[in-house]
Image (tube, coloured by chain):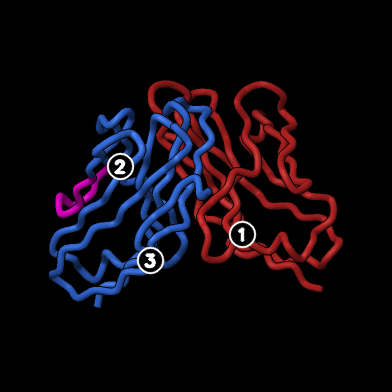
Chain colours: A blue, B red
Amino acid sequence: DTAVSQTPKYLVTQMGNDKSIKCEQNLGHDTMYWYKQDSKKFLKIMFSYNNKELIINETVPNRFSPKSPDKAHLNLHINSLELGDSAVYFCATGTSGASTDTQYFGPGTRLTVL
Amino acid sequence: AQSVTQLGSHVSVSEGALVLLRCNYSSSVPPYLFWYVQYPNQGLQLLLKYTSAATLVKGINGFEAEFKKSETSFHLTKPSAHMSDAAEYFCAVTNSGGYQKVTFGIGTKLQVIP
């Protein structure tokens, strides 16, 4: 069983469209994250949820809206997609959100905006 | 604010040679430090972490790292490189209190030459 799964794996879309990426975990962890990895492999945190509550909200355009319907799911909705949104988006989980937590990453969703 | 600096975005070693990937940190409080590895087209996975216990930390796949406060370093080493070690390696630092917020380095791509 995959611990952290993301769908879709690849997403190609036109500028201006709205799209969603889904993340599911079966680890029973309390904390979930969204990261963006750009073309130079730089990885930056976007959001963090703990028990469905938003904990970290980095300087991300408000076109990005995370939603956590339950502890096992964290989805990312992106409105009005722009060329600069092209990247690989990773979902990750942590046991409790403590600073010493190991994070468990999903396989990533490669978003290409044309 | 905490940060890590990875020296060398690309490192090449011969199979069987020593692997040394450098990471220096900056933090106003004692840090927690991590090394993650990313294989092509995959998410990150933890190699090892320092959480203020032993300064020499052993991880998976024969890797280890030593926390040196005097040098503000947390370099990753492996005595003998294997072809399967070819990947991107990320050093990371987190805050020591509150919910975890990870800051990643830019990554070092390790090439292993047969």
Q: Nearer the viewer, residue B101 or A22?
A: A22
Q: Amino acid at mark 2?
A: Phe
Q: Which stretch appears magenta?
A: A58-66
Circle 1 packing at 10 Å, graded few (<14), some (14-19), many (20+), is some
Q: Amino acid at mark 3?
A: Arg
Asked if A73 appears above or below A112 in the picture, the reply is: above
Q: Amino acid at mark 1?
A: Gly
Chain of residue at mark 2: A
Q: How many labels sit on residues?
A: 3
Residue A11 bears which disc, if any? none
Quarter of the figure with the C terminus of chain B: bottom right
Q: Which residue is mark 1?
A: B8
- Residue furthest front in the image: A1
Q: CA distance from mark 1 to mark 3?
A: 26 Å
Residue at 37% x, 69% y is A10
Q: CA distance from mark 1 to mark 2?
A: 29 Å
Look at the numbered disc 1 and give the secondary structure of its residue.
loop
The answer to whether marks 1 and 3 sit on the same chain is no
> Which-is-in-front pick, marks 2 and 3?
3
Question: Mark 2: few, some, or many residues within 10 Å (few <14, many ≥20)?
Answer: many
Residue B80 locus on image (x, y percent): 84, 55
Q: Quadrant of the N terminus of chain B?
A: top left
Tell me the chain of label 1: B
Of residues A60 and A111, which is closer to you in this image?
Answer: A111
Q: Position of residue A24 (x, y in %)?
A: 38, 46
Residue behind mark 3: A110
Residue A75 position in % (x across, y down): 27, 48
Secondary structure at numbered mark 3:
strand
Q: Residue furthest bottom?
A: A114
Q: According to the image, label 2 marks what residue?
A: A47
